[in-house]
Image: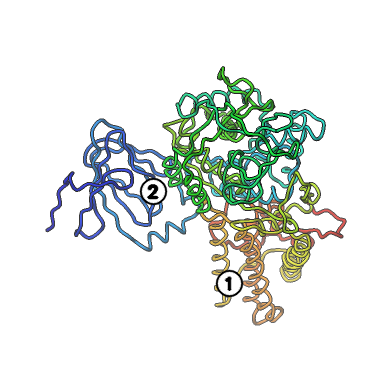
Amino acid sequence: MKISRFTPDELSAAFGIDMAAVPGIGPGAGWGRVAPGGRSEAHQHDETEIFVIVRGTGELLVDGERTPARPGTVAMFEPFETHVIENTGTEELLFFDLYWRDSARAAAAAAAAPADRRRFGKRPVFVFSTPPTPNGDLHLGHLSGPYLGADVFTRFQRMNGVEAWHLTGSDDHQSYVADRAQRDGRTPAQTAAHFSAEIAATLALMDIRPDQYTVTQADTDYPDGLRSFFSRLVASGAVNKRATPALFDASTGDYLHEVVVSGGCPGCGEPTGGNICEECGEPNLCTDLTDPRSQRSGEPPRRAAADRYCLPLHEFQATVAAHHRLGRVPARLRELAHRVFTRPLLELPLTHPAHWGVSPRESDAKGQVIWVWPEMAYGFLHGIEALGRTLNRGWRAKAPQQAWKIVHFFGYDNSFYHSLLYPVLYKLAFPGWEPDIDYHVNEFYLLEHQKFSTSRRHAIWGKDILSTDSVDAVRFFLARTRPEGRRTNFDPTAYETLLSDTLIGTWQRWLNGLGSRIDEHHDRRAPDTGVWTPEHTAFLDRLAVRLTAITRSLGQDGFSLNRAATELDGIVEDTVAFADRERALAGLGPWQDETRTALALELAAARLLARCAAPIMPRFGRRLSAALGLPDTADWPGGVELLPAGTKVTLTDTVFFLGGDDKESADV
């Protein structure tokens, strides 16, 4: 027998609380102590872990859900569950900790269905695509990134029974809007309204219809809500008005930031505009640009002090690190945070002298507006409240709930704001809220190996390529080539080749041919299976492997449209190869039972393709389901299913994709 007793002197800091190991009893073991008001860091690991509460009271926070903890409570955490223990009482909270590695259990947890992986359960899931700047319409670079990603993610989660909503809007108060308005001879409000409507129309052409689309300048509740949020930041004591260095046009005296100033990035040295570098993702203060130039006069600016509300962001490294331990934060974003916090000082202005935007309610902020990027942090909460009114839910921007799950899709050039600045602002405005946020970031999509650019008019616009006949092909091509983890290039010739050779020449040819064989041998009805061969069972298993791969590719941890699109094409490639091999027995009487099984398995593959393609290619999924005599199901498949014998099949003449020379329109 081995005896161990709790000894406070053996405790040392670990995971944000006090821990002491208990060696020699088999599994890993230890004592944990949490001081009143204290809490552990949010963390997850591959071990299975058990807490036994011995003394004190508190709460266990697991993937956003709180559970009371008191003496006698025994809690087991599965591998990879994000968990926190918090002391809500007046005396220390003491618990005994057991943990061990179970490779099979960890593998099962990692491979669990994505809807179960983080146990979304009944939590509301708010999926945000970065609100676009209404200084132009959307091009394929925009569409391939946040908007397609958020749309597919939301569709997939809903198919898995999750309450998920897609939210976005138009970021009306950007300085880029005012700059475009000046060039076009319009007011900023007119420019924003015009392009906001164009953007919404382009999203609809892409079959992206957000559940909430907030037009910031047109929402009458928005300005006061934003002002209240900003006043919370000021009331925290961390955001104060102070005189800090700024740039001004040497000729006109205009204040310079963002689009109206350029120079070399102080971080990577690449050319950049004011306030953020698109290459390395680091912020700048404009005054630290190398060889700055005013975009108004082309001259070097003069330097002078400007009174602005500023945030000493350099003081909040620990806040950002704690936030990054809670949700899905790609290494690219954590590395960016490391670079930013190597700076000794980063006094970040949160207001700027300007006329276009929302002015704070603070009396000493005359002539200033709230910078649009901190504004966006509030805008996300406002969008949730607006959606809540539509759904008759009691969500409030001024009272964010711990149960909320937020998922952000954005381009890498917005990484600093989303993953560093906003967590700090939320902590200051709502100290008791720990936002549970997953981040999905894309790189730049290139055209002719240069960045798509609204301002330079270097783009293929969504409206130039999207139609009811092309939308699924465009969505599939963008899913397959979008810039995940690396920059990729849109090639119009490659798109046309994929459409003609893959979608029409392979997918549609197989489906129409399958229909012809069903017509000829089974009177347009799905056959029942007959005799199974080892090749049949191997093919069924191969389809199951494809289903698992697609499921993981669309889930919240391993989300990748590149992989999902590849796996969809893999279903067709596997099936075409299988059909080619099995066709050798077609028409041979002694093997008719085996031939029936092969045809039934091809129909099972078509059924699987219809359901798995639905998040990426919704029209194709509906059309294929209809041709298979199936309803437009809203559920994600739990396995490979045979088409019920006797089901009427109309694959032969169904047009799924149209080439550039086709004049007819497929039924929707």
Residue 481 visible to the viewer: yes
> Of residues 560 and 162, which is closer to you in this image?
560
Give the image location of residue 407, x and y in percent.
54, 44
Quarter of image, res 595:
bottom right
Q: Is residue 591 above or below residue 126?
A: below
> Of residues 491 and 333, which is closer to you in this image?
333
What kind of element bears circle 1? Answer: helix
Q: Is residue 658 above or below residue 346?
A: below
> Of residues 136 and 637, which is closer to you in this image?
136
Quarter of image, res 88:
top left
What kind of element bears circle 2? Answer: loop
What separation in Å lies between label 1 and label 2 (alpha carbons)? 41 Å
Q: Is residue 507 left or right of residue 265?
A: right
Quarter that holds the N terminus: bottom left
Callout in the foreground (1, 2): 2
Looking at the picture, which amino acid does disc 1 mark? Phe
Q: Is residue 625 above or below residue 202?
A: below
Other residues around mark 1 within 10 Å, as few (<14) / some (14–19) / many (≥20): some
Residue name at image x 50 percent, y 41 percent: 405
Give the image location of residue 660, x and y in percent.
84, 59
Residue name at image x 56 percent, y 57 percent: 553
Looking at the picture, which amino acid does disc 2 mark? His
Q: Is residue 11 left or right of residue 226?
A: left
> Of residues 547 and 24, which is closer to you in this image?
24
Other residues around mark 2 within 10 Å, as few (<14) / some (14–19) / many (≥20): some
Residue hosting label 2 = 43
Disc on res. 612: none
Disc on res. 539: 1
